[in-house]
Structures are given as structure tokens and as C-alpha cells.
Image (spheres, helix red, strand yellow):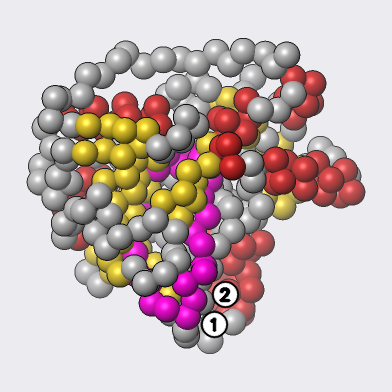
Amino acid sequence: MNESVTAIKPAPVLAPESIGITPRTCAIGADVFGVDLGTPLDKTTFAAIKAALHEHLVLFFLDQTLSPETHIDFASKFGDMEIHEVFTSLAGYPEVSVLEHDADRPPISDSWHSDVSYRTDPSMASVLYARHIPPNGGDTLWLSAYAAFDALSEPLRDFLQDLHAEHDFLQAYGSYLRAQPDGPERIARAHIETPPVVHPLIVKHPVTGRKLLYVNPTFTSRIVELSKPESDAILGMLFKHLLSPDFQVRFKWREDDVAMWDNRATQHYATGDYYPEYRRMHRITVGGDQPLPAR
């Protein structure tokens, strides 16, 4: 029998009566109703949203109207905003990444990943705003890294908790950067500015205290304590384990929808099945901290 997971439960936050929170699955995801993110939020409403984020990991706000300023205002309430190493920023708003794809710019986020796990201090959260949605396809999936850890057997958990994994920026973006006109210079700069980092393979969430599986096929390159054949075998098994539908929620976008997720306890996959149609999203990422070892 799997060992019980001891969580640090924050004090309950009662949402105002005007707010509705409806879970999408038992493991992850909830719709939030009665909130206009384009207007200033009072302290009670913000506290309710923050508590819901810790509980459900991904929140969906339908039919919102955000300017770059109100998008920034909402995201900044959660912490300092970051600028991405690869994505283009919205003109005049460096904090807002533009994720824009069409026939000439194929999708590049169609693999499971936790954002910027290749940094020493990966992101805490992201707020994604749909600006143009293709007529078909373009859904995003998220998975709960809590649920993935909980589903592991106790002996495997014990084995993994003392291991560390390397996360490599160039494993994901190397081919993309090499194809750019200034590719060699960008690759050389990446070796200096974003070298591989090492994180615990099992980490503890800094707010909830829950343990989670912290490897992803996009950025995780190896388990440092193991030989290459051993590392490849264990990572291959874990990557397959993460694909269970029981850990996931899938969201079909409409223009003006907003999704916010806890990047520390989730992974996501932006499907590329709309190619070569046009898709445009605006994203703001909130900075986080160094992943905590599980023990």
C-alpha cells in the first residue's frame, strides 16, 4: 500500500458568494465563474483565487477581456514577472510573451513540460490569454505532478527520492535556435547564460508541502547518480507513467479565455494539431524559487 502523503493545508479561504469554482476532474483543473480579471480584484476575491490555484492547480476563466495592462496587473499580484529566453515579447510589454504559430512558424510547445525547469529558480505560475484560436485543434492539456507521484509504488518512491535530474535548455531549444539566422551566436550564448541545472527528482511544494514528480521529457536530460542506460530506462518509465489520463485535464480554448496554472506542480502540452492554421496566445510567467528536496 502506498504511504500517505502529508500535506501542509493552508487555512481555508471562503470565496465570495459571487464566485463559483467548479472542478473539471478529481486530480486537476477547475472553472472559475463570477470573476472579471479585467477589473481590480478585492483582497477577498484574490485570496479565493489563490487558494483555488493551490487546490486545483489549473484555473480556467472564460470569456475575459484583458488589455496588456490588466493582464500584467493580475499576474503581478502573484509575484515578479519574467522574460522568456526564446519567445518574442509584445511590443512595449516585455513581460508579455507572444506565442504565435502558423504555416511559417510551426508549433514548438507540443511536448510535456514544466516551464523553464532548466532554470535554477523555475517559474511559479503562468497566466495564458487566448487571442486567436484556430477553427479546429489547439487544445492544451495539463497533468498533476502530485497525482503522478501518488500513483507510484512505495518502493519506487523511496528509490527516487534521493536522486537528482539534470534539466537542459538546449535539449528543447537547441534545434530551434540553430535554425535562426543568428543561430551559432545564440547557441554560444545559451551555453553561458542557461547551462544545465540539477534538481531533485522528487520535490516538495513550498506552499502545500505535497510531494510531486519533477521530471519532464522536454527538459530533463538524465539522472545524475545513474549510468546512461539506467538513467534512460528510469526516465523512459517515468515519462510513460506521466501520460496516464487519470492525472490530466484537457481544455478546448475559445478566444478570450484565460488559463492560469501552478507551474511547480503541473506539466502541460500545447497540441500542434491545428498546423498550419494561425494561433496566437499572450502569456505572462511569474517567477518562482529553487525546487525543494522531498526529504
Q: Quadrant of the N terminus?
A: top right
Q: Position of residue 128 (x, y in %)?
A: 34, 54
Q: Is residue 4 left or right of residue 240?
A: left
Q: Is residue 46 magenta?
A: no
- Give the Cα separation between the discs numbered 1 and 2: 5 Å
Q: Position of residue 125 (x, y in %)?
A: 39, 43
Q: In front: 278, or 42?
A: 278
Magenta residues (range): 261-286
> Mark 2 = which residue?
177
Q: Position of residue 80 (x, y in %)?
A: 31, 44
Q: Is residue 116 left or right of residue 222?
A: left
Please tell me which residue is depicted at 63% across the width and 56% down the height of the picture: 218
Secondary structure under badge 1? Answer: loop
The image quarter containing residue 111 is bottom right
Q: Quadrant of the C terminus?
A: top right
Q: Crowding near pointer 2: few (<14 within 10 Å), some, many (20+)? A: some
The image quarter containing residue 97 is bottom left
Please tell me which residue is depicted at 46% across the width and 55% down the height of the picture: 140
Q: Position of residue 255 (x, y in %)?
A: 27, 63
Q: Is residue 262 magenta?
A: yes
Contact between marks 1 and 2 (CB within 8 A): the answer is: yes
Q: Is residue 278 left or right of residue 291?
A: left
Please tell me which residue is depicted at 32% across the width and 29% down the height of the picture: 52
Q: Crowding near pointer 1: few (<14 within 10 Å), some, many (20+)? A: few
> Mark 1 = which residue?
180
Please tell me which residue is depicted at 81% across the width and 38% down the height of the picture: 225
Q: In front: 132, or 235?
A: 132
User: Residue 290, can we see it?
Assistant: no
Q: Is residue 213 left or right of residue 259?
A: right
Secondary structure under badge 2? Answer: helix
Q: The disc labelled 2 sits on which kind of residue?
A: Leu
Q: The disc labelled 1 sits on which kind of residue?
A: Gln
